[in-house]
Amino acid sequence: MNGAKSADEDTGSPATFAPLRKPTFRSIWLATQVSSLGWLMQTVAISWLMATISTSDLMVALVPASSTLPAFILSVFVGAIADNFNRRKVMFAGRCIMVIASAMLTASVALGFVDPWMILGFSFLIACGGALNDPAWQASVGDIVDRRDVPAAVTLLSVGFNTVRTVGPALGGILVASFGLVTALAVTTLTYLVPLGTIWRCKWKVRSSPLPREPMSTAIYDGLRFTAMSSEIKTAIARGTLFGLAGIAILALLPLVVRDQLGGGPLAYGALTAGFGTGAVFAGVSNGVFRRRLSQERLMTLACIACAACSLSLALTSSIAVAAIALALGGAGWVTAWSGVGVSVQLASPRWVVGRTISIYYALIDGGIAAGSWVWGMVAQNHSLAWALAGSAGALLLVAAAGVLFPLRERHESEPDPLEQFNAPAVALNLKPRSGPIVVKVEYLVLAENVDAFLDLMRERRHVHSRVGARHWTLQRNLQKPVQWTETFRTPTWTDYLRLNHRLTTEDRQLDERVLLLHEGKLPPQVTLLIERTTGQVRKPVPSTPFFPHR
């Protein structure tokens, strides 16, 4: 039994493809690949159309920016939607937007209404649908597959996209060259219908909360606060953003490399993009093996070096064969980097906030990609294409060196789910869900010799409670009775206080037990719940003056 397990781990295939045993995940994953195939064909069509109708290098480079900017603008909001509403319905709504926008773009091109800004506008609208769908789909992965399979599922998302990347651009180039832009765009619209029908058909169980839905403002605030308090997530987002900023030049400037440096057409562009996807597929399938043999930080460093070598090679070569080999190396580095940071964010996020952390991650990395598209497009337009690609290579090496200051943390298990087991304490007042603010005071008795250990545990407790909703957390020591310590924090409403306790995990409860061991006294720490009330001066009504009519 152990020998079989060891053999499986060496091959890497069972771990990598285990999530596909789940019918729901498999169906949506396959439908997503069909849609991704259409998106890649559409990207080739739009990029080549822009390169033919516009003489501006910047406008060509803005095509990938238009498809990533919506995620930067909307992701924080759609992440809160994904955590507060039915994720399946959110995915369906996003897919509907993509179908409608793609159909409108196809009709406009068919009727001859072609303008560079109009092309960017429709690309932006299609990306808005994707921005609504993607966080909900990524957050649903943990609902559909087992926890131990989450890393493999996240890797499969990258592997799947980069698998169709091997044929999508080439197929898009063939369609554009053989049948024209309208046909390519029409086929894309049809591919967008496939996941729409699959999501409509598939249903999966999601653990429901007994508490009411969070207000959007509170949900966004909680997501931002949790992300800001997680050093692991912040590091992954920072490295991913810098990598996207530096590395997007490879894909953003590839149409210009084909047109100006290699002298090729749509078929050459599609074939080179397929070479990029081939390298990405190889790295994705081998990702499990790489992760067992190398640390995540080492993989990130190698990925940056591979992409830097690709970018520099494109700057120097005039051979399509050399460019294809360089792009295969770049594709391997591309998927290795994104798989690593994506898995880091997923595993560091509990289920109640995963949609928001993923959306914030997408917002910032897509913002970096959009900014990089603009930066390298400006460098290519104002200086030269070779300078832009060489600058991208140098920036990628700096991203690799940043690992010395901001290394990615190694994690093999996902963040534990909250217990969601909390009996609300009895209160004497008739509280409503929105009653508040609520003040919580916990009194401890700690001997002098245990103070240092107590303070260490309370620092952990402050972090734990603050990231699940506690605000204005403080710890006070009684001046007249030094053994008495009081922990105080607030929540905006009574429902927020209940939600905070529902979000605590088994590890958090174990921390409470460790604190309790340092408490002296026959009775447990005393917990007091209070509600704040304003004491502002109330204006008293002015007594009216009697009216006596003149006689």
Image (cartoon, rainbow, N blue to C red):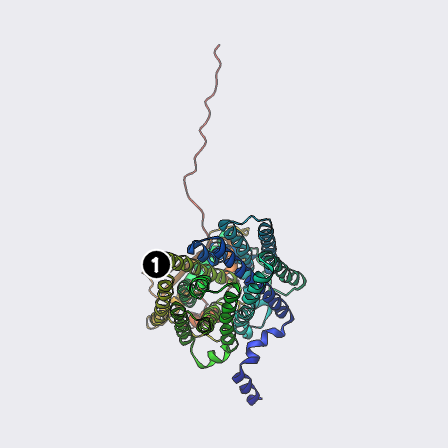
Number of numbered discs present? Answer: 1
Residue ID at (48%, 16%): 548
Horizontally, residue 106 falls left or right of residue 50, namely right
Horizontally, residue 527 falls left or right of residue 81, namely left
Q: Nearer the viewer, residue 418 or 197?
A: 197
Q: Assign a secondary structure to mark 1.
A: loop
Residue 148 place in picture, x, y as percent: 54, 75
Mark 1 burial class by Cα count in 10 Å: few <14, some 14-19, many 20+ = few
Quadrant of residue 316 within the rendered picture: bottom left
Please say whether residue 331 is visible from this viewpoint.
Answer: yes
Above/below status of 130 relative to 170: above
Residue ID at (35%, 70%): 397
Please say whether residue 136 is visible from this viewpoint.
Answer: no
Quadrant of residue 243 within the rendered picture: bottom left
Q: Nearer the viewer, residue 8 or 185?
A: 185
Above/below status of 272 relative to 92: below
Residue 306 place in picture, x, y as percent: 41, 73
Amino acid type, label 1 = His
Q: Nearer the viewer, residue 56 or 329?
A: 56
Q: Name the residue carrying label 1.
A: 383
> Quarter of the image containing the N terminus?
bottom right
Q: Residue furthest front?
A: 263
Residue 326 place in picture, x, y as percent: 44, 73
Residue 228 place in picture, x, y as percent: 41, 61
Q: Residue furthest right?
A: 201
Q: Nearer the viewer, residue 446 or 90?
A: 90
